[in-house]
Amino acid sequence: MENSPPTNSITLLDGGMGKELQKMGAPFRNPEWSALALMDDPGFVAEAHANFIAAGAEVITTNAYAIVPHTLGPERFAKRGADLAHLSTHIAKAAAQEADHPVAVAASLPPLFGSYQPQHFNENLANEYYKVLVEAQDEHIDIWLHETISSLVEFQAGNDAIRKYRTESFEAPLWASFTLDDTRAEPVLRSGEPLEQVIRSVNSKVDALLFNCSKPETITRAVETACKLLNGTQLRVGAYANAFTDVHDQDSAGNTLLRQDLGPEPYLRFVDQWISAGATLVGGCCGIGPDHIRAIRNHIDT
């Protein structure tokens, strides 16, 4: 493993790739979403990584989130999925190597059947799709990031696939990041499974427990609860929220309006809450750009 984030300090993640590409004027449309730039003009992907690194990110995530049959279509995924996922890793690693500070690369293992839709998870197909993404990203990555997980069934399938199909990156840490039901007062997954059950299920299987692609208010409650329940353990806790007004599935994410009250300074206040509660991995998801990451970097450094 070439770069490994420290375990006893705050590690700054990057922000949302899709909205950053859209803002930059990269090729972008639904259903391909962030994968379109990778297919049509990958220089935009390299530039987006560079923007987050320049803002101070210490971990960047491969642009593999939309490389799934749900967005590409099953036939195009079968033909091009492995090559595109490998390209996403190559671009991220090159960006990390050009950075003026140490940057780790996290391989994205995304939702296979649509974000926020645990009811659509297909165990019979999951292993086949995960195998493509794991093997294609296995080279030169520093962290496995299974993200936007909506249910424990999805977590277990992804976790099993990473352990089964990784090779070169066998010692890379495993991070599991869950998305939460924004309509509930208590922290639960979008499947309805409570956070206490999640922690019991993942505690001995991963190196970090994170929450992402949910409203920052929802994530604050989850981080506070998780840090209390995990007190005295070695499991790291992290968070990277989105800036969506309201979104129910990934099909509409590319067209979803962003909140006007989550500029860098307001978002930083949420990040400060997460750190105060005990989180050591912080960054942003959809709609959180380099300016947000720079504000967090400046805050951490002062």
Image (cartoon, rainbow, N blue to C red):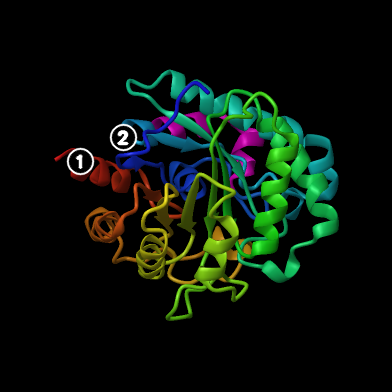
Q: Residue 123, located in which quarter of the rendered image?
A: bottom right
Count neighbours of disc 1 (C-alpha within 10 A) and say few if under 14, some if 14 to 19, many if 20 or more.
Answer: few
**Do callouts 2 and 1 mark residues in contact (Cβ within 8 Å)?**
yes
Q: Residue 202 in the image: x percent, y percent?
A: 57, 56
Vertical placement of 76 versus 284: above or below? above
In the picture, the disc for residue 95 is none
Q: Residue 241 in the image: x percent, y percent?
A: 41, 58
Q: Amino acid at mark 1?
A: Asn
Indicate yes or no whether the magenta region holds residue 40: yes
Part of the protein shown in magenta: 34-51
The residue labelled by disc 1 is 298
Q: Residue 104 in the image: x percent, y percent?
A: 45, 30
Indicate yes or no whether the magenta region holds residue 48: yes
Callout count = 2
Q: Please give left or right for residue 222 compared with residue 155 in the image.
A: left
Q: Secondary structure at mark 1?
A: helix
Q: Amino acid at mark 2?
A: Gly
Prevalent SS, magenta region: helix
In space, the residues marked 2 and 1 are separated at their CA atoms by: 9 Å
Q: Please give left or right for residue 288 compared with residue 152 in the image.
A: left
The residue labelled by disc 2 is 56
Which residue is at the far front? 232
